[in-house]
Image (spheres, rainbow, N blue to C red):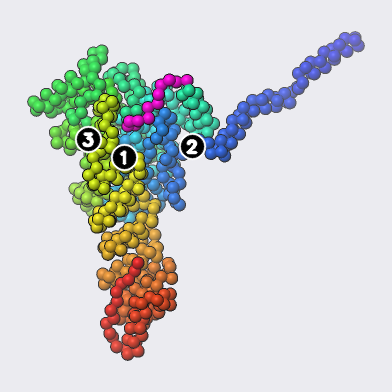
């Protein structure tokens, strides 16, 4: 019995020695084994962020104290095979939403961004200007997040960030890029047709570890691939990977399903958050552009055959029949640069499902067209509107806001719709120089595939004729030699040097409207216009700057110019304000002395004249004025004292 127990104990000891651990220690051991890979990934992620590897995927970043702007690297989440990724039109908004604020976000592709008039000509800028004119006491923020060559995948991705900013309204003009936009079913930037996988991949981009893995795989693939990377040509011409997508083919249906699935989730999120949505139907160039790729497919005829029939119907005065056939010809075009009619059908169905408001931009453009069918009078190419076309879309959005009571709450002008529109168009910040830029962009676009055979491309220096200095500046911008901001400044400088001060002021206003956070533009404009003795133009810049933030410089010039205009009380108010903000400017005190002298308040006048002389003993005009005032006060006689407003 003892021997048997001894053997059992021996086996038990051997078993315990073999396993090494028992009970709770064994569980901890396995837990550590499982956690090691996760710990490694966490440490790798932290290390990559410390080393600043990769890029920031936040939708918004701080661009100035108190202001957010769109992240210029945002599009890198969706583009991995092009070197220069698109950007938004750089609208900014306050980090803390003002109490009287009205905040609108705009989502879409290049036609949402206003191509080729970016950043100035988008329909969102019409909406913003009209809101600013109608509601001058409200803080209007219209933030356009549209980008060239993006589609519903991008919109779906940025919705949470948009909702965090407490929007009052959402405007959507999207759907043209579902096939060839980033991550679309026919795009060179493609991850397949499984939406869940594509959306998951986009979400994982926020991790630097994932970026490292993707970049590593991309590098390996590039070494194994013999296909050369195309780096020239327009972004549009490079994005189309699957150039033939027949009507009602499987890939055609995948594109519709992609749009429907993504936008269903987009509208669901906005609806759940209580954010009102205006969803616009899409307009295309119907009768001004023949289909790009025309071939028969199964039971469907070639697109150009239907297009020719539409043209004949139009000549015969059968406008309704022609319109239907032009739309069908567009749908039969195998090159999917224009949204098929089924995209507009989806817009109607989803809007009804989630209570979004349909803005019928397509019908508005048709109604405004000379022929009743959208053509070259309202489109610069296949789908991008003219400046007037964008104004029509903007007006259609605004009228829907008005109709459904989605405008700001507060005091507003009691203008008719016609006056609102005419004043908005008249004060729209857009110049002939900006029209030249747009014209050059369109020439470059149409001098590439699919408009022509790329082998017949004309070099830009030959294609873009430069007749004057402004043409040369526009050429340098569209060929990426200077950025937009510098191009606008160079244009302003040209107008100033040639004595066209009104045009100079307009260009500076364009810069200020685009970049309201750069307050130095105001001072620069004031200094230049004062030097040219254009006091009325300078006054406008000074007054707007003073309303944004009271500063000594704008207050000084408001005071001096009011003195020049003989508006003495206003002059004294601004000059005293200036002296309180900066008490060492002798010219401010000299002009204050002059203002009080104009009122024959010689005691105060002498006080300020003495301050000016004390600060600047060599200031001859101030010394002369002081001496005159001292004589007047000694004689106690009301004598008219000559004062010349002075400043620099």
Tell me which numbered mark, 1 or 3, is placed earlier along the sequence: 3
- Quadrant of residue 346 in the image? top left
Quarter of the figure with residue 402: top left
Q: Residue at x 29, y 88 (%)?
A: 637
Looking at the rendered structure, the secondary structure element under dot 2 is loop
Between the residue at mark 1 and the residue at mark 3, the CA separation in whole angstroms equals 20 Å
Residue 195: image quadrant is top left
Residue 645, above or below 279: below
Q: Which residue is tagged 2? A: 55
Element assignment for label 3: loop
Residues shaded magenta: 224-235
Q: Quadrant of the C terminus?
A: bottom left
Q: Is residue 470 left or right of residue 275?
A: left
Image position, residue 41 (x, y; %):
59, 30
Report how far apart the C-alphas of labels 1 and 2 lie in the structure: 26 Å
Residue under numbered circle 1:
478
Q: Position of residue 439 (x, y in %)?
A: 24, 39
Which numbered marker is on residue 229? none
Task: Report the disc number at residue 379.
Answer: 3
How far apart marks 2 and 3 lie (CA) works out to: 37 Å
- First of labels 1, 2 by sequence position: 2
């Amino acid at each position: 019995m003892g021997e048997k127990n001894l053997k059992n104990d021996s086996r038990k000891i051997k078993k315990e020695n073999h396993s090494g651990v028992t009970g709770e220690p064994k569980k901890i051991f396995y837990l550590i084994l499982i956690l090691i890979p996760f710990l490694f990934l966490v440490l790798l992620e932290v290390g990559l962020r410390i080393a600043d590897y990769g890029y920031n995927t936040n939708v918004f970043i701080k661009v100035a104290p108190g202001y957010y702007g769109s992240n210029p690297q945002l599009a890198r989440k969706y583009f991995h095979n092009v070197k220069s990724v698109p950007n938004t039109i750089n609208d900014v908004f306050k980090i803390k939403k003002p109490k009287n604020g009205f905040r609108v976000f705009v989502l879409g592709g290049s036609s949402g961004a206003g191509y080729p008039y970016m950043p100035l000509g988008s329909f969102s800028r019409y909406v913003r200007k009209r809101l600013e004119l109608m509601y001058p006491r409200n803080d209007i923020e219209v933030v356009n997040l549209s980008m060239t060559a993006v589609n519903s995948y991008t919109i779906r991705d940025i919705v949470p960030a948009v909702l965090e900013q407490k929007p009052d309204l959402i405007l959507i003009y999207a759907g043209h890029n579902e096939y060839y936009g980033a991550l679309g079913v026919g795009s060179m930037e493609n991850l397949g047709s499984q939406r869940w996988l594509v959306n998951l991949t986009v979400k994982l981009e926020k991790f630097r570890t994932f970026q490292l893995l993707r970049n590593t795989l991309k590098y390996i693939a590039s070494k194994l691939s013999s296909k050369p990377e195309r780096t020239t040509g327009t972004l549009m011409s490079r994005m189309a990977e699957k150039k033939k997508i027949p009507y009602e083919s499987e890939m055609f249906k995948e594109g519709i399903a992609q749009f429907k699935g993504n936008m269903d989730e987009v509208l669901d999120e906005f609806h759940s958050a209580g954010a009102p949505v205006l969803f616009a139907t899409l307009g295309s160039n119907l009768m001004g552009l023949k289909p790009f790729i025309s071939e028969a497919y199964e039971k469907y005829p070639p697109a150009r055959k239907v297009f020719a029939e539409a043209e004949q119907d139009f000549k015969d005065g059968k406008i309704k029949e022609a319109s239907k056939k032009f739309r069908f010809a567009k749908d039969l075009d195998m090159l999917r640069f224009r949204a098929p009619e089924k995209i507009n059908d989806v817009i109607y169905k989803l809007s009804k499902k989630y209570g979004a408001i349909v803005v019928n931009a397509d019908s508005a453009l048709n109604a405004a067209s000379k022929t009743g069918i959208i053509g070259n009078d309202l489109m610069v190419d296949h789908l991008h509107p003219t400046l007037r076309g964008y104004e029509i879309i903007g007006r259609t959005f605004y009228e829907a806001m008005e109709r459904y009571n989605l405008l700001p709450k507060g005091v507003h002008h009691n203008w008719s719709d016609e006056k609102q529109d005419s004043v908005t168009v008249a004060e729209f910040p857009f110049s002939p120089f900006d029209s030249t830029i747009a014209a050059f962009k369109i020439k470059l676009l149409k001098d590439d595939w699919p408009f022509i055979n790329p082998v017949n491309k004309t070099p830009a220096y030959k294609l873009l004729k430069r007749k004057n200095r402004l043409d040369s500046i526009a050429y340098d911008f569209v060929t990426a030699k200077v950025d937009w901001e510098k191009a606008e400044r160079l244009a302003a400088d040209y107008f100033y040097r040639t004595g066209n001060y009104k045009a100079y002021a307009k260009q500076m206003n364009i810069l200020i409207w685009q970049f309201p956070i750069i307050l130095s533009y105001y001072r620069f404009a004031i200094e230049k216009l004062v030097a040219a003795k254009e006091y009325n133009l300078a006054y406008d810049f000074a007054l707007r700057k003073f309303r944004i933030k009271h500063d000594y410089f704008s207050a000084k010039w408001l005071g001096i110019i009011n003195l020049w205009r003989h508006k003495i009380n206003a002059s004294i108010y601004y000059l005293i304000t200036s002296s309180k903000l900066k008490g060492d400017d002798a010219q401010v005190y000299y002009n204050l002395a002059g203002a009080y002298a104009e009122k024959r308040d010689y005691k105060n006048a002498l006080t300020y004249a003495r301050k000016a002389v004390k600060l600047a003993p060599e200031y001859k005009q101030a010394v002369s004025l002081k001496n005159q005032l001292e004589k007047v006060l000694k004689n106690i006689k009301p004598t008219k004292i000559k004062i010349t407003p002075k400043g620099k």
